[in-house]
Amino acid sequence: MEPITTITSQTTVLPLDDVDTDQIIPARFLVSTGRENLAEAAFADWRYDADGKPKRDFVLNRPESKGASILVTGNNFGCGSSREHAPWALLDYGFRAVISTDFADIFRNNALKNGLVPVIVDEAVHRWLLDNPGAEVTINLEQAELVLPDDRKVSFPIDGFARYCLVNGIDQLGFLLQQSDAISEYEQTRAWPV
């Protein structure tokens, strides 16, 4: 995982509430255990028609959405079943952060563990973001702040351990491996039964 300190991007807006993990990545794409090659599956039922052709009216298929790494969504994003493939698909598509007023707990935890930053904002900031698609914003992960185009800084909650891992580009196992010297030292001071 690459370290994340800031993310600056235009936003893509998907103004739908209660987007569940089966909409983020339909179940038929869950045959893979890898994180790669899932970009095409992201929102597949909304992005493509029955013949597999892109639907022009879907936001991710519009030219103004190309290259955006921040997705602004409606309320309760990532609800539904526990599906680690959901953040994998979003990351493989190119998103690095998702902004909403709230996230399903399991989705939020899966996102944080895989390098996708879930940013929770209040209703007023959310409304502004929804009304201004394509706005360039910055997420400062070290300060836990969203910086809007007018330089207004909005704090967002994020678990301290998850933020440490994201900023340092490690996952939970990587954190434990960083502690191997301290673990070995501790083990040497303990008498273990034989």
Image (cartoon, rainbow, N blue to C red):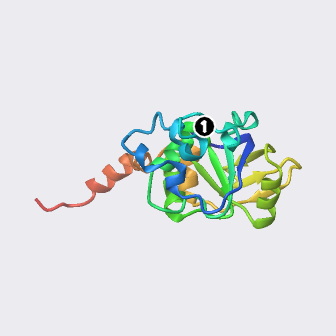
Where 183 sits versus 34, above or below? below
On the rendered image, what quadrant is the C terminus found in? bottom left
Taking the image as shown, residue 28 lies to the left or right of residue 158, namely: left
Q: How far across and how far down the image is residue 134, in percent?
A: 79, 43
Q: Nearer the viewer, residue 75 or 118?
A: 75
Q: Nearer the viewer, residue 187 or 140?
A: 140
Q: Which residue is mark 1?
A: 94
Q: How far across and how far down the image is residue 87, in percent?
A: 52, 48
* Residue lying farthest to the right in this orientation: 150
Q: Nearer the viewer, residue 56 or 82?
A: 56
Instruction: Classify residue 168 by image quadrant.
Output: top right
Q: How far across and how far down the image is residue 5, in percent?
A: 65, 43
Q: Which residue is drawn at the image coordinates 85% and 47% (left, top)?
A: 149
* Residue lying farthest to the front in this orientation: 51
Q: How far across and how far down the image is residue 152, in percent?
A: 85, 54
Q: Secondary structure at mark 1?
A: loop
Where 123 sits versus 93, above or below? below
Q: Which residue is drawn at the image coordinates 68% and 45% (left, top)?
A: 70
Q: Nearer the viewer, residue 185 or 116?
A: 116
The amino acid on which the numbered mark 1 sits, given as a three-letter code, is: Gly
Can residue 1 be seen by looking at this rendering?
no
Taking the image as shown, residue 166 lies to the left or right of residue 129, namely: left
Instruction: Classify residue 177 by image quadrant.
Output: top left
Can residue 172 be seen by looking at this rendering?
yes
